[in-house]
Amino acid sequence: MAEDGRESRLPDLSALRIDPQARLKARRGKRTGLIVAVVAAIAVLGVSALALKNRKVTVEVAAARAAIQGKGAVVLNASGYVTPRRRATVAAKITGRVQELLVEEGMHVEAGQVLARLDDSDAKSRVASARTNQEVAFAAIAELEVNLTDANRTLYRTEKLFREGVSSQQDFDHAQAEADALKARIALTKEQVRYAKAQLEVALRDLDNCTVRSPFKGIVVSKDAQIGEMVSPVSAGGGFTRTGIATIVDMNSLEIEVDVNESYIAKVSTGQKVEATLDAYPDWQIPCTVRTVIPTADRQKATIKVRIAFDALDPRILPDMGVKVSFLNSEETSKNTGAHTLIPRQAVRDVDGKQVAFQFKEGKLTMRPVKLGQTRGNEIEVLEGIAAGDQVVVNGPEKLRDRQRAEVKR
């Protein structure tokens, strides 16, 4: 009975079994949550990709230009600066204080135009003194000529009396000496007059040197002195004295000066055609001609200086501008290369081993495979792929895509 009593007190475990239908519902709930999470992740990625695809990129563009037929192929590239053949720092010929300054930077001046005036009070005093000395010498001559006339009359009478035996030889000799002495004094005074005249000319020249004039027609590029400063043709005063008034450049004498490595100087000759590109205007090709090859080398740099003349000057060309030049071979023309357009070299990109350029049109980029020719300075010939006038990207993000939306940098 005791054993049967223990058995009657054991719990009924059959009530703990899991319902198979509940287990199936739990599994279905987990799968549904996982599917929802995956779909949500895919949706987020899709939206992100769509937003990235539609995002505009900012780019810089340049227009492709037609290649001018008949230009020679580039045989050598070099860089240098625009320099004037005539450039002068105008200085005074004398030491003085600047009293009036009549120029400013950028002013056009004519040959002989007054640039500045120095204090001329001392010079005027010297002119007055020299003029007075000249007048005194002239007056002395007049007095001596009167005395000489009187001495000649005395000599005439003495000579007549001497011949008649009334006057002595001594009296005659004395009268003769008096007349000769006056003649000598008159000759000396005339020389003094010439000397006084020369002194007056020097004083007048010193007075004129107080006015500083332009030696040629040009533009003032630098004002080197101010009113009240001392100027001198030589450095003095421990560096406190100016040696120049203003610097003037003859804009009609502008040319290009480049240093060519002596190893390549054989490719350069006088009269050779050149294409120049100013650093300030990279899209402007300027036709030029080699004016001269300086017949000496720089042993320190192993270069030879070449001067290049502009075929036509332009107000945009300024002294000391940086410039890059391409020496052309007139025997090989662009007709032979088949070039149709020229684009900046930075417009060409390498995409999957292919040379391409991105064309910008109506707010979208189009990837255009290009066939390239020779390099011309900062530009490169395009044989196929880009037409003249097309806008091509020259600067922008490293990775661009076909049909990508874009806007031009302002």
Image (cartoon, rainbow, N blue to C red):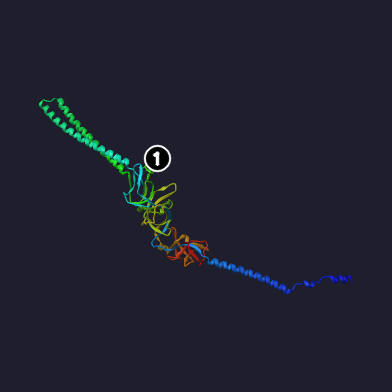
Q: Looking at the picture, does residue 183 appear above or below residue 55? A: above
Is residue 357 in view? no
Q: Position of residue 246 (x, y in %)?
A: 37, 48
The location of residue 127, given as percent across then percent down, is 28, 40
- Which of the two residues, 236 or 369, is positioned nearer the viewer here? 236
Farthest-out residue, left: 164
Q: Could you tell me residue 196's position as x and y percent?
A: 26, 37
Horizontal side of 361 relative to 134 (left or right) equals: right
**Residue placed farthest to the right in the image?**
1
Q: Amino acid at mark 1?
A: Gly
Q: Residue furthest bottom?
A: 21
Residue with the mark numbered 1: 237
Q: Secondary structure at mark 1?
A: helix
**311 relative to 48, above or below:** above
Q: Is residue 176 above or below residue 72?
A: above
Between 275 and 93, the residue placed more toward the observer is: 93
In this view of the protein, which residue sits in the foreground, 399 or 245? 245
Residue 253: image x %, image y %? Answer: 35, 52
Nearer to us in this view, 253 or 18: 18
Residue 189: tell me if it is visible: yes
